[in-house]
Image (cartoon, grey):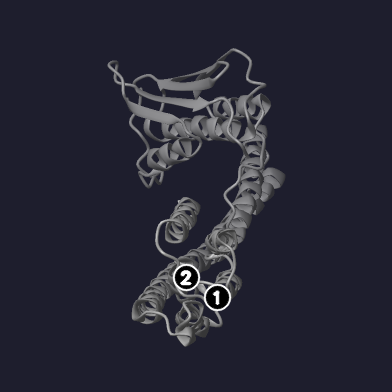
Amino acid sequence: MRRAVDLALVLLVAALGLWRELVLSAPSRLVMASLAFYVTVHLLSAAALWWRRTRPVASSLVIAFLALLTPTYASMVSAYSVAAYATRYRWLVVTHPVTWAVGAGVWAMPTIGDGFTGPGFTVIAGLAGLYLGARRRLVQALVERAERAERERELLAEQARADERTRLAAEMHDVVTHRLNLMVLHAGALRVTAKDEGVRKAAEELRTAGCQALAELRDLVGVLRSGRTAYTQDVSPEPLSRLVADSAATGLDVTLTQHGDDDALSPAVRRTMYRVVQESLTNVHKHAPGAHADITIHSGPSSVRAIIRNTRPSAAPDLALPGSGNGLLGLRGRVEMVGGTLTAGPTDDGGFQVDAVLPTFVPT
């Protein structure tokens, strides 16, 4: 847009110069030369305006020199430009009314119009350039100050989030990890001292689950401390099968059915699908004891769908099991983070169903 304006100014000033030389009577001049010479002066002055924004000082000096030979309308535009756009040497604006007056032949006793009218308009153009340039610089400074303040607010907010993540990581490491370590140690001691084979097997399963929880907790603490949200663990179908097997080992009647090829799933989608199944099975354990859970995975070329459905519970839920009530809410946020959708609600037969649809590929 600016280049179009500059080009229009160049053409306008060139046309006015030709009109001045070819149509109007030639003014008094200090240097006597042919008509072609003065036409060339006007055209060169107009062409120098092309650099009035990028090189205002150089453009102004060229136009001021040419104005010594004959006054040109480019002097008015250049006076405005050097005053508005130059970062240094804005005082060069005073050269344009002076060179106009000299070029018009003030000292050769020209008409009053040649000696004073043109320089007067040039002074007005220079003053307008000084005002608008100062206004533009002030607005730019205010914008930069506002942007800097916004960046500072963002940095302060990010620092506050980082401090909160660090505090949470410390609390999880000092409190939760300590409790899990105690559970693992007690389970290991029970496995060694118990005489019943079933008790030893249950203690070993509890110790293994505790060790897995500790490993995942360490990963989560690392994510909180680093501030990165990344899916770095690629959950393959084997861990998903093991997850189902672990639930079945605790007495849950659960079946897993997979349709399609899930090799094309990206790691982020695999991990999200794993968490959907994990949280759903946890809810079945808590809220639907004795129910049958059916897990169906449909893997397509562009999306994967996980449906976890359980029947009506055959026993009352254990009220001693803790629950925050935010499991499905957090799960929905995790699914939406990778561009998927999640719906959950009761079924007509008194059971419950979780339905998650995820894209096949999400950049890690």
Foreground label between 1 and 2: 1
Is tag 1's residue or tag 2's residue first in the polypeptide sequence?
1
> In the rendering, at what x and y percent does residue 232 appear?
66, 43
* Residue 292 lies in quadrant: top left
Residue at 45% over, 52% down: 8
Quadrant of the rendering where the C terminus is positioned: top right
* Residue 24 lies in quadrant: bottom left
* In the image: residue 207, left or right of residue 117: right
* In the image: residue 50, left or right of residue 222: left
Q: Which residue is mark 2?
A: 81
Secondary-structure class at tag 1: helix
* In the image: residue 96, left or right of residue 351: right
Residue at 45% over, 59% down: 13
Residue type beneath disc 1: Ala
Is 20 drawn above or below residue 62 in the view shown? Answer: above
> In the rendering, at what x and y percent does residue 360 appear?
57, 25
Is 182 drawn above or below residue 206 in the view shown? Answer: below
Q: Which residue is mark 1?
A: 64
Task: Give the camera-side residue of 156 and 134.
Answer: 134
